[in-house]
Image: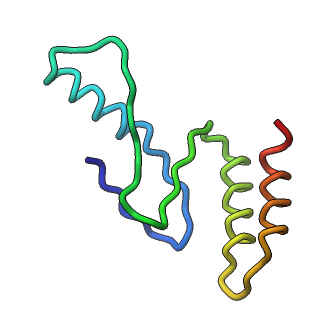
Amino acid sequence: MIEIDTKRRMEIIDITYEVESKLKDNASHEGGFSSGLCLVYSMHTTTGLIVNEADGALIEDILDILEKIVPREQAISMIEVTAMLMHICGPH
């Protein structure tokens, strides 16, 4: 298990090193492995996991959109949330 302590209301924490370290530890105990799956999940309801590059501008964009989706003082509609996510994610 990896435990992460947060400091702010919203923040993005890169856990790549912690996950890689756990995989290496497990590989040494299991006699090594060359392929497989790694399941990463959160046991907390207000945590989100994103698999993406740790690009500074992207992180700022994600934090900005989260602040708009879940502002401290006012709620916004699902239509506005969808429009903001489409702007960040772009068409597929």
Q: Residue 3: x and y, percent?
A: 30, 55
Query: Considering only vertical position in the picture, is 63 above or below 25?
Result: below
Number of dots carrying numbers: 0
Q: Residue 36: x and y, percent?
A: 37, 20
4 relative to 28 in the view: left or right: right
Residue at image position (44%, 66%) is 45
Query: Considering only vertical position in the picture, is 10 above or below 42?
Result: below
- Locate residue 6: give its quadrant: bottom left
Query: Considering only vertical position in the picture, is 77 above or below 41?
Result: below
Q: Residue 47: x and y, percent?
A: 48, 61
Residue at image position (30%, 33%) is 21
- Coloration mode: rainbow
Residue situated furthest bottom in the rendering: 73
- Locate residue 52: give its quadrant: top right
In front: 14, or 65?
65
In front: 48, or 59?
48
Residue situated furthest top in the rendering: 34
18 relative to 14 in the view: left or right: left
Residue at image position (38%, 31%) is 38
30 relative to 24 in the view: left or right: left
Q: Tell me the quadrant of the picture where the C terminus can be found.
A: top right
- Locate residue 77: give its quadrant: bottom right
Residue at image position (44%, 38%) is 16
